[in-house]
């Protein structure tokens, strides 16, 4: 059995065995505390300096990034503005060139029409000269004055008025007066000219089929008249405008074969060469 004295002694020994290590640790901590106080402030200062440097670097990078972004945006805007300006200039030039091209095409079309008109007017003026009576055709009346129901009609004046209307571009009046002339003076020396003038008027109105029929009447009604080759050449031109190339070639070849002495034979051959190329 353990006596009270023995129990007290054991408890004292146990207390001493537990508290001694704690005391030793406490004493060591107290001894090292001044050294820790000396080390920690130095490290803290170094860390603060490093953090400050990092902040400066971050700010510098952010500033460089912002400046680069602004420079890039400025460059892009300048490029876009320059591109837009160049596009506007190019578009303006294209529109200007297109307008000039259209104007030139219109002028070219007008010149071509004027050339054809002058050709026909020249041919009509040449064909308007009264031709001598041919021994191979029925006699033509030279007298163009006739009285109808007490009214005197001057055939020469009637034909001159028709030609004046033709020069003014009034083709309907030209046709009417020429038809009246032919009805009153079918055997006049100027009858082939009136017939040609009807065909010319229809041609300039764009009625090519009707025009060639009127031109063919010159050959049918006045086969020996020197103006027949003129009429046949105009028939060929009508077929060209009707896109009937073979028919045009046939009439041009007819002129070359049957009228080798025709005054305008060079133009006939030239037109034929263009169609047969």
Image (cartoon, rainbow, N blue to C red):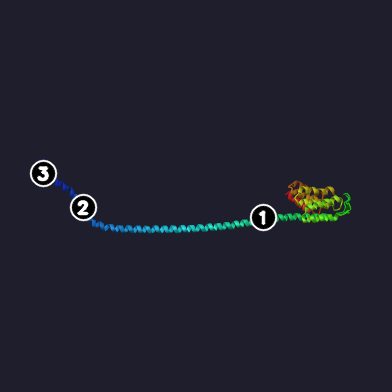
Marks 2 and 1, the one that precedes in the sequence: 2
> Residue 177 got which mark?
none
Pointer 2 residue: 26
Pointer 1 residue: 102
> Relative to 204, is 29 on the left or the right?
left
Q: CA distance from mark 3 to mark 1?
A: 135 Å
> Relative to 21, is 70 on the left or the right?
right
Which residue appears at 60% of the width and 57% of the height? 92
Q: Are marks 2 and 3 in contact (CB under 8 Å)?
A: no
Label 2 environment density (alpha carbons within 10 Å; few <14, some 14–19, many ≥20) = few
Marks 2 and 3, the one that precedes in the sequence: 3
Identity of the residue furthest to the front in this view = 150
Observer-nearest of 15 and 245 = 15
Which residue appears at 30% of the width and 57% of the height? 44
Observer-nearest of 172 and 228 = 172
Q: Are marks 2 and 1 in contact (CB under 8 Å)?
A: no
Q: CA distance from mark 2 to mark 1?
A: 109 Å
Which residue appears at 18% of the width and 49% of the height? 19
Pointer 3 residue: 4
Q: Quadrant of the N terminus?
A: top left
Question: Residue 228: image x %, image y %?
Answer: 82, 50
Question: Residue 41: image x %, image y %?
Answer: 28, 58
Label 3 environment density (alpha carbons within 10 Å; few <14, some 14–19, many ≥20) = few
Q: CA distance from mark 2 to mark 3?
A: 33 Å
Label 1 environment density (alpha carbons within 10 Å; few <14, some 14–19, many ≥20) = few
């Amino acid at each position: 059995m353990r006596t009270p004295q023995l129990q007290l002694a054991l408890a004292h020994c146990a207390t001493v065995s537990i508290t001694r290590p704690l005391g030793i640790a406490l004493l060591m901590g107290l001894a090292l505390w001044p050294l820790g106080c000396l080390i920690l402030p130095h490290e803290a200062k170094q860390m603060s300096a490093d953090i400050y440097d990092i902040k400066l670097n971050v700010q510098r990078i952010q500033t460089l990034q912002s400046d680069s972004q602004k420079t890039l945006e400025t460059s892009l805007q300048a490029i876009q503005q320059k591109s837009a300006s160049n596009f506007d200039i190019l578009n303006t030039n294209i529109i200007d060139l297109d307008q000039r091209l259209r104007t030139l095409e219109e002028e070219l079309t007008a010149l071509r029409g004027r050339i054809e008109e002058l050709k026909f007017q020249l041919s009509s003026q040449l064909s308007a000269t009264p031709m001598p009576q041919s021994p191979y055709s029925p006699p033509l009346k030279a007298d163009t004055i006739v009285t109808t129901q007490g009214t005197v009609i001057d055939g020469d004046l009637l034909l001159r008025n028709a030609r004046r209307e033709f020069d003014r571009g009034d083709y309907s009046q030209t046709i009417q007066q020429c038809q009246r002339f032919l009805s009153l003076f079918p055997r006049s020396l100027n009858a082939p000219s009136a017939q040609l003038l009807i065909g010319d008027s229809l041609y300039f109105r764009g009625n090519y089929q009707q025009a060639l029929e009127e031109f063919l009447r010159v050959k049918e009604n006045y086969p020996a008249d020197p103006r027949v080759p003129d009429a046949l050449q105009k028939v060929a031109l009508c077929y060209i405008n009707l896109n009937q190339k073979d028919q045009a070639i046939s009439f041009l070849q007819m002129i070359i074969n049957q009228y080798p002495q025709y005054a305008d034979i060079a133009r006939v051959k030239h037109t034929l060469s263009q169609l047969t190329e």
